[in-house]
């Protein structure tokens, strides 16, 4: 069974040529938005879509390029489309998202006083697969991104790894490929400099070639074109293209 992946954006947090690294994952009758960053409303509009075309949104961690578009999404759903969007979120991020990100803009006494007033909230536990649609099952995998902040990668249908933002974890990739049937890796990449909170291209180039062949690169900087042909066996995901996974 194949899925369709269309990146709303493939850019790093500071990219200006590319929108935020947010994705549409569809199975033909259900569409999930993976992360909803600052640029998501415009990126969606430029693809000729609206928030009403989506069935659910999932958040990987609390950074503006992954959650900055949620206020507009919630307001549009309430006042333009008169329904709540399903929100899939790790239990550990639920209160943080409301208290530290959304409450200031969304709260309206008597109308919106908690996350559940704005979204149809479904909490996820890491390591426990959750069926989102007939053809999409998804598991959160805790990752290392910012020390002391919760952040999650995604494992989809027991074969597709979506890194979200994370530092290099070759042991995890080795385990997913060697023991858990992973055949597709959608991985963030920092093209230059020390990784610090991201995974660098040089780190990914240290992976065995068969693993590199599974990797599509995303969350990259504006000078990505300078690196075409310099990514070993790995290829870049392109913003707006529809990929069959
Ligand atoms: O300790 C830190 C924390 C953050 N940052 C930058 O802020 C950005 C936030 O979004 P991001 O996670 O996509 O990318 C992050 C980096 O570009 C950093 O360089 N070092
Ligand atoms: Zn990011
Ligand atoms: Zn981040």
Image (cartoon, rainbow, N blue to C red):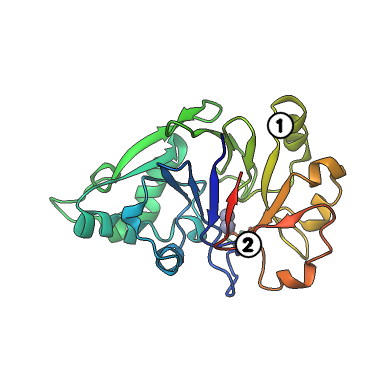
**Residue contact at pointers 2 and 1, CB within 8 angstroms:** no
The residue located at (52%, 56%) in the rendering is 22
Q: Check the image and name the residue furthest to the left.
A: 110
The residue located at (48%, 60%) in the rendering is 64
Image x and y of residue 81, in percent: 22, 55
Q: Mark 2 points at which residue?
A: 238
Tell me: 154 left or right of 121: right
Q: Is mark 1 on a helix, strand or loop?
A: helix
Rounded to the nearest angstrom, the CA distance separating label 2 from label 1 is: 24 Å
Is the residue indicated by label 2 positioned so its CB lies within 8 Å of ligand 2?
Answer: no
Q: What element carries label 2?
A: loop
The residue located at (51%, 60%) in the rendering is 8
Instruction: Give the quarter of the figure containing the C terminus.
Output: top right
Tell me: 198 left or right of 102: right
Instruction: Find residue 47 and name its label.
Output: none
The residue located at (68%, 44%) in the rendering is 185
Image x and y of residue 99, in percent: 35, 49
Instruction: Find residue 176 and name its label.
Output: 1
Mark 2 surroundings: few (<14), some (14-19) or many (≥20) residues within 10 A: some
Query: In the depicted view, which residue is nearer to us: 45 or 119?
Result: 45
Looking at the picture, does residue 189 appear above or below residue 139? Answer: below
Name the quadrant where ligand 3 sits: bottom right
Image x and y of residue 4, in percent: 54, 47
Instruction: Give the quarter of the figure containing the N terminus.
Output: top right
Tell me: 135 left or right of 152: left
Residue 49: which quarter of the image?
Answer: bottom left
Which is nearer the N-term, disc 2 or disc 1?
1
Looking at the picture, does residue 59 appear above or below residue 69? Answer: above
Image x and y of residue 132, in percent: 43, 34
Q: Which of marks 2 and 1 is in front?
A: 2
Is the residue indicated by label 1 positioned so its CB lies within 8 Å of ligand 3?
Answer: no
Looking at the picture, does residue 163 appear above or below residue 224? Answer: above
């Amino acid at each position: 069974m194949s899925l369709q992946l269309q990146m709303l954006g493939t850019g790093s947090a500071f990219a200006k040529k590319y929108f935020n690294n947010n994705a549409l994952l569809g199975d033909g009758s259900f569409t999930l938005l993976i992360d909803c960053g600052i640029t998501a409303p415009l990126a969606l509009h430029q693809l000729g879509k609206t928030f009403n075309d989506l069935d659910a949104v999932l958040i990987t961690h609390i950074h503006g390029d992954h959650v900055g578009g949620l206020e507009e999404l919630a307001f549009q759903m309430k006042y333009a489309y008169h329904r709540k969007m399903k929100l899939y979120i790790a239990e550990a991020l639920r209160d943080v998202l409301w208290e530290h990100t959304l409450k200031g803009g969304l709260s309206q006494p008597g109308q919106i006083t908690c996350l559940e007033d704005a979204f149809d909230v479904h909490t996820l536990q890491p390591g426990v697969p959750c069926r989102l649609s007939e053809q999409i099952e998804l598991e959160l995998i805790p990752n290392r991104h910012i020390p002391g902040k919760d952040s999650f990668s995604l494992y989809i249908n027991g074969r597709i790894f979506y890194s979200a933002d994370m530092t290099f974890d070759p042991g995890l990739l080795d385990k997913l490929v060697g023991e858990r049937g992973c055949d597709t890796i959608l991985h963030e990449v920092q093209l230059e400099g020390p990784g610090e909170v991201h995974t660098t291209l040089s780190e990914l180039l240290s992976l065995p070639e068969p693993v590199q062949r599974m990797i599509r690169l995303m969350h990259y900087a504006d000078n990505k074109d300078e690196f075409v042909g310099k990514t070993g066996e790995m290829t870049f995901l392109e913003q707006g293209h529809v990929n069959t996974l």
